[in-house]
Image (cartoon, rainbow, N blue to C red):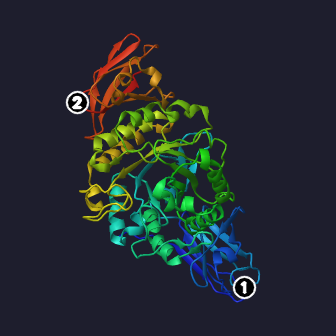
Amino acid sequence: MKKAIYAFLFVAMIGGSTVLAAQTSIWARHELGFQSSSEYLNPLYDVRSFAVEFQSPSGRIHLVNGFWDGGLSWKVRFCPDEKGEWKWESRCSDQDNSGMHGQSGVFTVGDNEDPAGIYQRGRIVRSPGNYHLCHLDGTPFFWLACTAWNGAMRSTEEEWDRYLSDRKEKGFNVIQFVTTQWRGLEVDRNGEQAFSGCGRIEINPSFFQSLDERVDQINAHGLVAAPVLLWALPRGQGRDLSPGYYLPEDEAVLLARYTIARYGGNHVVWILGGDGAYIGDFEQRWKNIGRRVFEDNPPGLAAQHPHGSSWIGEAYRDEEWLDIVGYQSSHSNGQRVVNWINRGPMAEKWDMLPARPIMNLEPNYEMIRNQITAEDVRNASYWSLFATPISGLTYGHNSIWPWLYEGETILNHEQTEGYPSWEEAIHFPGSAQVGYLGDFVRSFEWWEFRPAGDLLADQPGEEVYNHFISVIRNPENGTILCYIPVRETVRIFNPSEISYAGEWFDPVENSYADADIENGGNILTAVSSRDRDMVLILRPTK
């Protein structure tokens, strides 16, 4: 079972400062432990601030918030981004606390031997002025996530390791999960909740200590953790059970900031809210929360995960804390949802907004309501990916997200019988085929592609909604990709009469075959080779 190794320093001083030396690796989590000299009734409120100022070898300053870990224990977690000697000094709002205020030390950062991209190329960041993510060294990062909302809280260490190994093998690189009790899970595997109360909450450190292990496992597999800080379903019973709605704004901010302090030393992308309504009546609340949670620029990017068939791109265009414009197309192969993916606001307005990654963070879940097939998953995935500049995509299975064991049903959701266990679900074909999609996209300079539906001479989707052909093009080298959901004749405008060579990609078999292309004047014509979906690749020959 793969383990992550993190440097840990424990500081237990009764006054003055100390200098401690340790060795850690670049891009690995570095942890400092502190023993408070005072006991607080409710540390979340009684200690207004506790942080450590880290100074890099080149002189850059990072101020990193700490967190209470139970009893007199406090910690600070940090991910160093330079090799060499680092210095640090602690600050506490309670300056009489000799165990937390005014401590100092040094540690040395060396090479990281883990070959994973996050340990060799650095954190995931947003590429300014572009629609894609990248590592800190500039290497583009194609987001391919799996939804395991309950997995980190319900799984055993061995189960989580098996799941993560499978996702990594299939090409996934991000895991989306929930970090508190919510509508879909009242307590974790040990019967614990993240917090209690509402107007004045109390943190439960033992809940988070168990969650720590699962977050560390994600990174140990070379994957990025994408925790939901505040689940936020706005309707009915979901609202009563969603911390993002029933907590007052101040408490929602405190809880989110606590979680960020706890996992900011990991490789993370924060999902502020899950399944929420972030415009209209609730818009100002969520803008306030986002601004306050991310006001001091904590490590890690920020995304939002709206409820089904909703979009926040225009309303949040000027929210500087938001790095990823997430949307959720919902779980249907019907006309309304298919048209919303292909003709909705993302497809129509992406180029009218400031450049940010735009991603479908929850398309069709495989097997949801025992209706959605692997084909439906492929359709929604390719349509979503080609509707905007390529940046990433999320997969989900209706037995994986709730982490179902044999014979269970999903809490506070539809009670359809017959769902497989999570162990069976990880082997369903949809996830393998989304993995093929990831490998296929990464074989191109995918970050250069832009939607190009105007190249189609005929759009079958105008007659039959689920025959919609998606087209995306790399303007730099002229490569064109066409996703064709059923056997169709594809006709592409070619006004410059450039000669193209064609190839078919089979998204089910993960295979390639030559395509016969008719270069007839200013129209290119090809006929798809299977009685199901295929991807046509057109490359100029000169």
Visible residue check, residue 244 = yes
The residue positioned 55% from the left and 66% from the top of the image is 263
Report x, y in % for residue 65: 65, 68
Q: CA distance from mark 1 to mark 2?
A: 72 Å
Relative to 91, 393 lies left or right:
left
Q: Quadrant of the C terminus?
A: top left
Report x, y in % for residue 472: 44, 30
Q: Which residue is mark 2?
A: 531
Q: Is residue 25 above or below residue 296?
A: below
Give the camera-side residue of 383 and 404: 404
Q: Which residue is mark 1?
A: 98
Is disc 1 placed on a helix, strand or loop? Answer: loop
Seen as rendered, the residue at the extreme right is 95
Is disc 2 placed on a helix, strand or loop? Answer: loop
Q: Is residue 204 above or below residue 237?
A: below
Kind of residue sitting beneath label 1: Ser
Seen as rendered, the residue at the extreme top is 521
The crowding category of the residue bearing disc 2, from other C-alpha atoms within 10 Å (few below 14, some 14 to 19, many at least 20), is few
Give the camera-side residue of 537 and 96: 96
Relative to 456, 367 lies left or right:
left
Label of residue 494 in the image? none
The residue positioned 66% from the left and 83% from the top of the image is 40
- Which is more N-terminal, label 2 or label 1? 1
Give the camera-side residue of 249 and 161: 249
